[in-house]
């Protein structure tokens, strides 16, 4: 169950959010004299669909093996950073900012308003106005009115940082930058998962710390994807996978909780999707663009659904139904004038 009030301190540490699904926009960008969008990769689209399901799995309170579903967050982070790194300098900073404003900050503002109204309505109906105090906190300013929205401003800021870094590091040989970025990501992962002060941090700082390792690892994956030789691409992705899972194993040996397990599973899935392409089909092509919106809206769907179908004892049905209903809501939303915010 996903209450609309502020989650507990323990839950806050694990609340993910974006997704990194940024489908190509078919309207204005194609009409203007801009560089063509990169073709969609069916393997990445399929992974995004699975990850969206994993996000809902993790957010289903009481569901078994939720740490597996939590791998969806590093999956989205890794894919997001990898595609920016693969893009290199083919996109100007001005266009990068315009697209990320449209795909990240505008939805963040819209859905912050939507969740703010939902929390206000709930507080009025229950008579518990104390819940509204957090709406005026620093957390709201940095993450939004609901903690799962933290990913959007984080992705905008960290994505811009990687975009700016692309210019100087693009001149560094791939055989140097890929291992260096992998090593940095592995060390960051170990350091962040072993940080004993994480639980004392106020949201969204724990979430930001969780996402740090994905930036250099995503850079390594993206540079590997850009290699012209398929053999070299696969070899580098295997190296990234082995190094990162090794770092996760070290972190687990120090009893670092489930975070290393989630990262380890995520890096394996991302490297597989980037190295071994699959044939797409109409269903994957139709569903993949909905995953971003599914992430944004699913807590509201879960909140309403739990009053009809309690999740306890029916976790699989609850997760499947939440996913399908969220997809239907977003599909309908895309036909309205507000389609730009999903």
Image (tube, grey):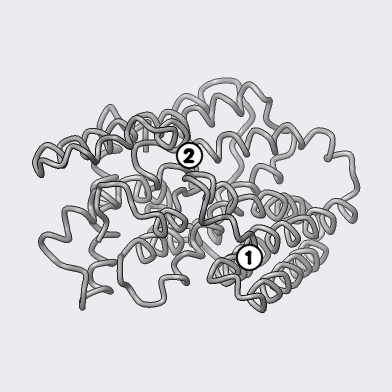
Q: Of 137 and 107, which appears nearest the observer?
A: 137
Q: In the rendered image, which quarter contains the N terminus?
A: bottom left
Residue occupying the point 57% across, 72% down: 261
Q: Position of residue 30 (x, y in %)?
A: 52, 28
Q: Dot 2: within a 10 Å radius of its alpha carbon, few (fewer than 14), some, or many (20 or more) residues? A: many
Q: Of 31 and 257, which appears nearest the observer?
A: 257
Q: Secondary structure at mark 1?
A: helix
Q: Dot 1: within a 10 Å radius of its alpha carbon, few (fewer than 14), some, or many (20 or more) residues? A: many
**Residue at the disc numbered 2:** 152
Q: Position of residue 93 (x, y in %)?
A: 67, 25
Residue occupying the point 43% across, 30% down: 141
Residue occupying the point 50% across, 35% down: 153
Q: Is residue 340 above or below residue 47?
A: above
Horizontal arrangement in the rendering, residue 70 relative to residue 247 (left or right): left
Give residue 160's quadrant in the image. top right
Give residue 210's quadrant in the image. bottom right
**Residue at the disc numbered 1:** 267
Image marks 1 and 2: residues in contact by CB distance under 8 Å:
no
Q: Of 202 and 84, which appears nearest the observer?
A: 202
Q: Position of residue 162 (x, y in %)?
A: 70, 38
Give residue 85's quadrant in the image. top right
Q: Is residue 124 above or below residue 279?
A: above
Of labels 1 and 2, the one closer to you: 2
Horizontal arrangement in the rendering, residue 334 relative to residue 257 (left or right): left
Q: Secondary structure at mark 2?
A: helix
Question: Of the residues under marks 1 and 2, which one precedes in the sequence?
Answer: 2
Residue occupying the point 61% across, 24% down: 95
Q: In the rendered image, which quarter contains the C terminus?
A: top left
Q: Position of residue 6 (x, y in %)?
A: 31, 47
């Amino acid at each position: 169950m996903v209450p609309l009030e502020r989650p507990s301190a323990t839950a806050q540490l694990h609340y993910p959010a974006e997704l990194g699904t940024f489908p190509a926009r078919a309207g204005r960008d194609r009409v203007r004299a801009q560089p063509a969008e990169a073709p969609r990769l069916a393997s990445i689209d399929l992974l995004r669909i699975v990850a969206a399901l994993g996000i809902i799995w993790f957010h289903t309170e009481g569901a078994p093996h939720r740490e597996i579903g939590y791998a969806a967050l590093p999956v989205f982070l890794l894919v997001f950073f990898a595609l920016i790194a693969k893009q290199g300098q083919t996109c100007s900073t001005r266009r990068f900012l315009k697209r990320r404003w449209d795909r990240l900050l505008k939805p963040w503002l819209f859905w912050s308003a939507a969740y703010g109204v939902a929390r206000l309505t709930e507080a009025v109906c229950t008579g518990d106005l104390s819940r509204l105090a957090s709406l005026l906190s620093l957390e709201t300013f940095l993450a939004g009115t609901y903690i799962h929205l933290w990913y959007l401003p984080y992705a905008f800021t960290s994505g811009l940082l990687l975009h700016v870094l692309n210019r100087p590091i693009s001149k560094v040989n791939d055989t140097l930058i890929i291992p260096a970025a992998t090593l940095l990501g592995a060390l960051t992962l170990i350091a962040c998962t072993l940080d004993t002060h994480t639980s004392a941090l106020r949201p969204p700082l724990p979430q930001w710390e969780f996402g740090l390792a994905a930036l250099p690892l995503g850079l390594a994956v993206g540079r590997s994807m850009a290699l012209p030789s398929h053999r070299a691409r696969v070899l580098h992705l295997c190296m990234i996978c082995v190094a990162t899972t090794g770092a996760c194993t070290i972190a687990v040996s120090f009893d670092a909780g489930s975070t290393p397990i989630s990262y380890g599973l995520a890096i394996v899935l991302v490297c597989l999707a980037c190295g071994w392409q699959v044939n797409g089909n109409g269903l994957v092509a139709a569903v993949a663009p909905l995953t971003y919106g599914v992430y944004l809206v699913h807590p509201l769907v879960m909140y309403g659904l739990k009053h009809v179908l309690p999740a306890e004892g029916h976790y699989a049905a609850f997760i499947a139904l939440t996913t399908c209903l969220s997809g239907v809501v977003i599909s309908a939303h895309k036909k309205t004038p507000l389609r730009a915010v999903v």
